[in-house]
Structure formats: C-alpha cells, structure tokens
Amino acid sequence: MNINMTPIKNDNVETLRDISIETFRDTFGDYNSEADMQDYFDTAYNVDELKKEINDQNSNFKFVFCDHKLAGYLKLNIGDSQSEIKVKDALEVERIYIKKEFKRKGLGTFLINYAMEQAKKNGLSNVWLGVWENNAAAIHFYKRMGFREFDDHVFQLGNDQQRDLLFKKTVR
C-alpha cells in the first residue's frame, strides 16, 4: 500500500469541497438533520471560505492518497489560525477525514504522525483536536494514539449546539 500527500491549492478547491461534504456526511449524516448538515456545508465548505483557509499561512491543508486514489484530507492550524486557543504552544488538527472505503488502512495513524512531525518542526510542544462526544470510534482512535481528554467546547452544526471533547498530546 502506497500512502502519500499533496498540498491543497486554490485550483483544488472544488475537490476539497466535494471530499469535505462526502466525508462529513458519511461520518455524521445518520445523527443529524439534513437541514443542519446543509447549513454547516453552506457555511464551512463554501468555495470562498475554503479558499480563504487554503491561503492562510498558518494553516496546512493536505490531500492524502492511498495507491494513487484520493482517500482523505487533513487541515492543521497554528497560531491565530487555530479555531480557538485552548492549549499554549500548540498545533491544532482541525479536520482529519478519510473516505469510508479507506478506513482501517493506517491512514489516520499516518496523518496523526504527520501532525506530530509538523508540530515538532514548528517548535511546538502540543497537538490538540476536538471530537464529537458521540463519535466513539474516533475517541478510541485518539486515545490509542496517546491523546488525553482535557476540556470540551460547543460545536455549532446548523441550529444544533453539540459538545466536542478536546484531546491533546505532548510532542516528544
């Protein structure tokens, strides 16, 4: 199995939008109303917003490929580009999504290891992320990767206020 990544650029914005909606819907669609999902897509995944995020110097977007097929994507943030500052000296994994047909192939581990390397490269001591409190599979994965819960926050999905658990890991 061959895993590689490429940077996401402005000319990839439609592909980014498509995979963002596909993976978010596959992960959370069964648990949320279509209206709330669509509202979130219109806000978070509109082309102008995604281009702004792609061009942010403190954000790092990557597509991940498995055997030359688009399998998922990753978004990392540092500094003021983090969704909030909950941990000092940290890198945020804001989005890490894998298409369902590529899950359980080691891509999540590959991407988390990449995030840890990027934090170290930037001289940061911590990596943190938010996980929906009802996403048991993701919580289990992050705990297995050495992340520990330290806080929570509200994630607004359309009109629904949801609780995300915040996890962090020290860079070694």
Image (cartoon, rainbow, N blue to C red):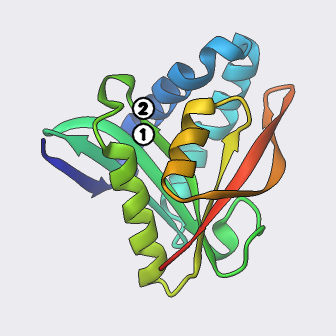
Residue 169 is at least partly visible in this image: yes
Is residue 23 shown above or below 123? above
Q: Where residue 116 sits: x, y (%)?
A: 45, 69
> Residue 16 sits in which quadrant?
top left
Seen in the picture, residue 70 relative to 57 is either above or below; the reply is above
Residues at discs 2 and 1 in contact (Cβ within 8 Å): yes
Q: Amino acid at mark 1?
A: Leu
For mark 1, does the 10 Å Cα neighbourhood hold few (<14), some (14 to 19), or many (20 or more) residues?
many
Mark 2 secondary-structure assignment? helix
- Which residue is farthest bottom? 123
**Residue on which the image places disc 1:** 16
Tell me the tag on residue 19: 2
Q: Residue at x 59, y 58 (%)?
A: 147
The span from disc 2 to disc 1 (Cα, nearest Å) is 5 Å
Left or right: 161 with respect to 37? right
Q: Nearer the viewer, residue 167 or 115?
A: 167
Residue 118 location (% of width, % of height): 42, 73
The answer to whether residue 145 is above or below residue 158 is below
**Vertical position of residue 67 compared to residue 122: above or below:** above
Residue shown at 83% from the left, 49% from the top: 153
37 sits left or right of 137 in the view: right
Q: How many marks?
A: 2
